[in-house]
Image: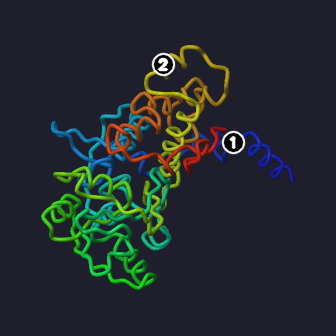
Amino acid sequence: MRKLAYAAALAVCGLGAAGLPAEAQVKSATLDAVKKRGELNCGVDTGIPGFAFQDSAGKWKGLDVAYCRAIAAAVLGDAEKVKYVGVTTKVRFTVLQSGEIDVLIRDSTLTFTRDTQLNLSPIAVNFYAGQAFMVKKSLKVASSKELNGATICMLTGATLELNIADYGAANGIKINSLLFDKPEEAFAAAEAGRCDGYSDDSGSVAAARSTMKTPDDWMILPEIISKEPLGIFAREGDEKWGDILKWTHMILLTAEEMGVTKANADQIKASKPVDPFMQRLLGIDEDFGKPLGLDGDWSYRIIQAVGNYGEIYDEYFGPKALGLPRGTNNLWTKGGLQYALPLR
């Protein structure tokens, strides 16, 4: 009974079998490997506006790229310590399973099959979308239900073909597909007239339209034919690494909720806020990172490196970029689905 009482006392105090605080016993093979390597291997798209692309100077940019930078800032203290691995739709999950990359953030849909059959862990949704169609205005259709007999360019190895087949069966139409490994190949084929349009998640369709020689010659049809919650994948079996990835996403959302931006984070921190949530967010609470195996400034570095979620979205999908409204990607307080778990 005395042994049981002692064990219970340790548990209440947060002590493990070795007499150490529970947060000091963080074990993550992936975290250890990333720290030892000094670089995060981040799987992203081969190149698509909005999510992941290289500018004229060869610098990687995009929503998913910003997440890679945020993770590196949290774990390694430097957002630049990232090796970007461009992966196609067809091989993206194999590359993650093999250990070639530490995390996959490649506009990929979180699904039942990918969770239960591929030994992957869907971590968080960083972009809510749905499959949409972009077609030439000269086709003179106003609805995807009018696409009977049309040929649509799309990517192989995704859920797109199945979604279209299901949609066609439900509406008594037949939509043909022309498949490609890379987005830029599909865009070029659509531009060249090899197909009548392009289909992908709504964010990627907006990106596709922006690459056309004359975007105004193309229109995005109103129907959304599927749910495509896009986000972060890790390998199964490393729960603590998954926690780091998940809470990186939550920090970006929380920062937007609390009005903390890349520009004002230093000023707010210097004001010594008394709000416990703000103290955790800005690294004033030095113990905040211990349960993740990180230091107390990990979340503050994320904001310094990339800003908050709204800032990232506006930079790559907003009015000066692709002109895609926030919609479901708005914060829950503004009618969207982005909702951060509390920092407590």
Q: Quadrant of the C terminus?
A: top right
Question: Within 10 Å of the Cα at label 1, are there few (<14), some (14-19), or many (20+) other Cα atoms?
Answer: some
Task: Find residue 228 and report its horizontal and vertical position in percent.
Answer: 45, 62
Element marked by disc 1: loop
Q: Quadrant of the N terminus?
A: bottom right
In the rendered structure, which amino acid carries the disc numbered 2?
Asp
x 46%, y 46%: residue: 326
User: 187 or 146: which is nearer to us?
Assistant: 146
Q: Is residue 251 left or right of residue 147?
A: right
Element marked by disc 2: helix
Task: Find residue 69 and report its horizontal and vertical position in percent.
Answer: 36, 39
x 38%, y 53%: residue: 103
In the rendered structure, which amino acid carries the disc numbered 1?
Leu
Q: Which residue is mark 2?
A: 266
x 31%, y 66%: residue: 199
User: 88 or 48: which is nearer to us?
Assistant: 48
Nearest-to-viewer mark from 2 and 1 = 2
Q: Is residue 132 left or right of residue 180?
A: right
x 44%, y 64%: residue: 120
Residue at the top extreme of this rendering: 271
Q: Is residue 122 left or right of residue 83?
A: right
Label 2 to label 1: alpha-carbon separation: 35 Å
Q: Quadrant of residue 72?
A: top left
Task: Find residue 303 and report its horizontal and vertical position in percent.
Answer: 46, 31
Residue at the right extreme of this rendering: 1
Which mark, residue 15?
1
